[in-house]
Image (tube, helix red, strand yellow):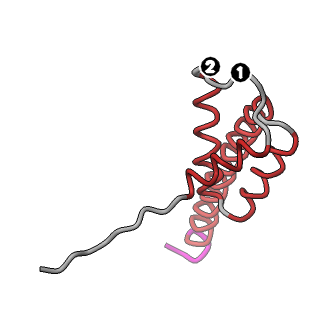
Amino acid sequence: MDQEEIRQRKLNELREKYSIQAEQQQKQIELENQVDLALKTVLSDEAKTRLFNVKLVNKELYFKTAQNLIYLAKSGKIQVKLNDMEVKRLLEQLSAKREITIKRK
């Protein structure tokens, strides 16, 4: 193979890789938009603000909380919009760490 063929093949590989990454990024954005829209229907403005602030600091806790809220809303267990204190309590429950103790014999 000559240099031009190698260069062209590498260029094609890079284009394909970039295309796949862009597609994945677009799917991630769409998913986040759907989650945000679902949360807006079950949270008050203050609660949304609190949860979105959590998203900036701890994405794992945010997604765990969002998943729980969406499940509760879909199952009909949330009838009215949750306020800030209710979301705060939910965040505390979900972020509670389990303490692991090791006993020696």
Q: Where is residue 11 drawn, in percent x and y?
A: 64, 65
- Residue furthest out toward the bottom: 104
Q: Are marks 2 and 1 in contact (CB under 8 Å)?
A: yes
Location of residue 55 with respect to 40 vertically, above or below: below
Which stretch is magenta? 1-5
Q: Which mark is residue 79?
A: 1
Identify which amino acid the numbered label 1 is placed on: Gln
Q: Secondary structure at mark 2?
A: loop
Location of residue 76 with respect to 93 vertically, above or below: above
Q: Where is residue 42 drawn, in percent x and y?
A: 75, 31
**What residue sits 79% from the left and 45% below the top?**
84
**Observer-nearest residue: 43 or 84?**
84
**What residue sits 64% from the left and 51% below the top?**
91
Q: Which residue is mark 2?
A: 76
Main SS of residues in magenta: helix
Identify which amino acid the numbered label 2 is placed on: Gly
Using residue 101 as the reference point, say whether residue 89 is left or right of it.
Answer: right
Quadrant in which residue 100 is drawn: bottom left
**Observer-nearest residue: 99 or 4?**
99
Residue 24 located within the stretch drawn in magenta:
no
Q: Where is residue 77 drawn, in percent x and y?
A: 61, 23
**What residue sits 79% from the left and 39% below the top?**
83
**What residue sits 74% from the left and 36% below the top?**
39
Q: Which mark is residue 52?
A: none
